[in-house]
Image: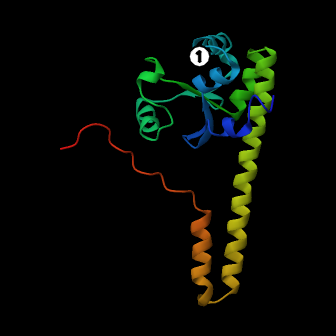
Amino acid sequence: MKELMPIERIESKILLIRGHKVMLDRDLANLYEVETIRLREQVKRNHERFPEDFMFQISEDEAGIMVSQNAIPSRKSLGGHLPYVFTEQGVAMLSSVLRSKRAIAVNIQIMRAFVRLKQILAGNKDLAKRLDELESKYDEQFQGVFEAIRQLMAPPPVPPKRKIGFHS
């Protein structure tokens, strides 16, 4: 399964919406190799298993932001519906609704991806804490070094979106 589903591919599908790490219903359906409408049907048939902290539908504004950040290619790609997003707990609950062998194997990989992201974030927090401790011990001559390290730890800036078409 690792060859079919690299964790990096799954990690690239995990988004931050409303302060939660989530995955889009269409991305999950793609990973499970089912149609998005079938995934939604199973969720609706088992709606009591998916409270708001497990799954929610994004708003029009959030969809617009996702298009502008290239998380989704366009509003048309949504098929006329605002997507549902699933938190880590919602993805785990999907395994009780989708019972194919593929769904089980994909869920295992998704859980590993969420755990790996948590470990990476925890490592960055630990590194930032240690850097603060070191900075407080040393004088101002090392200030530039600490600032350079902080810049290296920061995520890369999102490049501006290039306009397509003719410009006047």
Q: Position of residue 2 (x, y in %)?
A: 80, 33
Density class for disc 1 (Cα within 10 Å; few <14, some 14-19, many ≥20) is some
Instruction: Classify residue 130 by image quadrant.
Output: bottom right
Q: Residue at x 73, y 48 (%)?
A: 118
Q: What residue sits 73% from the left and 63% below the top?
A: 126
Q: Position of residue 35 (x, y in %)?
A: 61, 13
- State the image quarter where residue 3 is shown: top right
- Colour setting: rainbow
Instruction: Tell me which residue sits at (45%, 32%) in the image.
Output: 63
Quadrant containing the N terminus is top right
Which residue is identified by label 1?
Answer: 36
Question: 96 or 150, which is in the foreground?
Answer: 150
Task: Single out the residue that lies furthest toward the left.
Answer: 168
**Location of residue 151 by image quarter:** bottom right
Q: Nearer the viewer, residue 26 or 165?
A: 165
Helix, strand or loop at label 1? It is: helix
Whole-percent x, y for residue 119 in the image = 76, 51
Which residue is depicted at the point 68% across and 17% down? 33
Quadrant where the C terminus is found in the figure:
top left
Residue extending farthest front: 166
Q: Is residue 100 left or right of residue 67?
A: right
- Across the whole image, how many numbered discs are drawn on residues? 1
From the top left corner, tell me how far across and down residue 34 is, in percent: 65, 14
**Foreground residue, 138 or 49?**
138
At label 1, the amino acid type is Thr
